[in-house]
Image: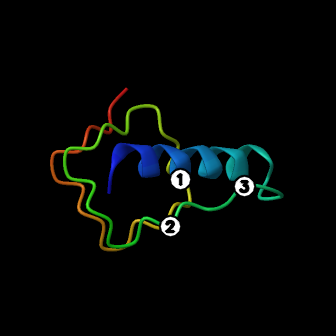
Amino acid sequence: MNSADLSKILEEHKVWITSMRESGSRANLCDANLCGADLRGANLCDANLCGANLCDANLCD
């Protein structure tokens, strides 16, 4: 997955969380290749990460 697509998905997910699920959309990253992705600061609460490759992804702030 390229960084532009990932950024768009994470932004929509952020809206979904902050709006109490009224708008935006839940991040569906099922089977996504997130190897080496910079996910610092991303709120992944309730995101679908089933089967996602998070090898070497940065999840720390």
On the image, which quarter does residue 21 sit in?
bottom right
Q: Nearer the viewer, residue 45 or 31?
A: 31
- Work out whether 40 lies above or below 27: above
Horizontal placement of 11 versus 61: left or right? right
- Work out whether 59 lies above or below 31: above
* Amino acid under disc 3: Gly
Residue sitting at the far right: 22
Q: Measured from the top left, where is residue 8 in percent x and y?
A: 54, 47
Asked if the residues shown at circle 3 and circle 1 are in contact, with their CB atoms under 8 angstroms apart, the answer is no
The residues tagged by marks 2 and 3 sit, at their Cα atoms, a distance apart of: 12 Å
**Residue that carries the numbered disc 3 in the rendered image:** 24
The residues tagged by marks 3 and 1 sit, at their Cα atoms, a distance apart of: 9 Å
* Amino acid under disc 1: Ile
Disc 1 versus disc 2: nearer the observer? 1
The residues tagged by marks 1 and 2 sit, at their Cα atoms, a distance apart of: 8 Å
Residue sitting at the far left: 56
Mark 1 Cα-neighbour bin, 10 Å: few <14, some 14–19, many ≥20: some
Badge 1 or badge 2: first in the primary sequence: 1
Q: Which mark is residue 28?
A: 2
Count of marks placed on residues:
3
Q: Measured from the top left, where is residue 60 in percent x and y?
A: 32, 32
SS for tag 1?
helix
Q: Nearer the viewer, residue 18 or 8?
A: 8
SS for tag 2?
loop
Asked if the residues shown at circle 1 and circle 2 are in contact, with their CB atoms under 8 angstroms apart, the answer is yes
Q: Which mark is residue 9?
A: 1
Write the residue at 69% across / 49% down. Answer: 17
* Amino acid under disc 2: Asn
Write the residue at 48% across / 67% down. Answer: 48
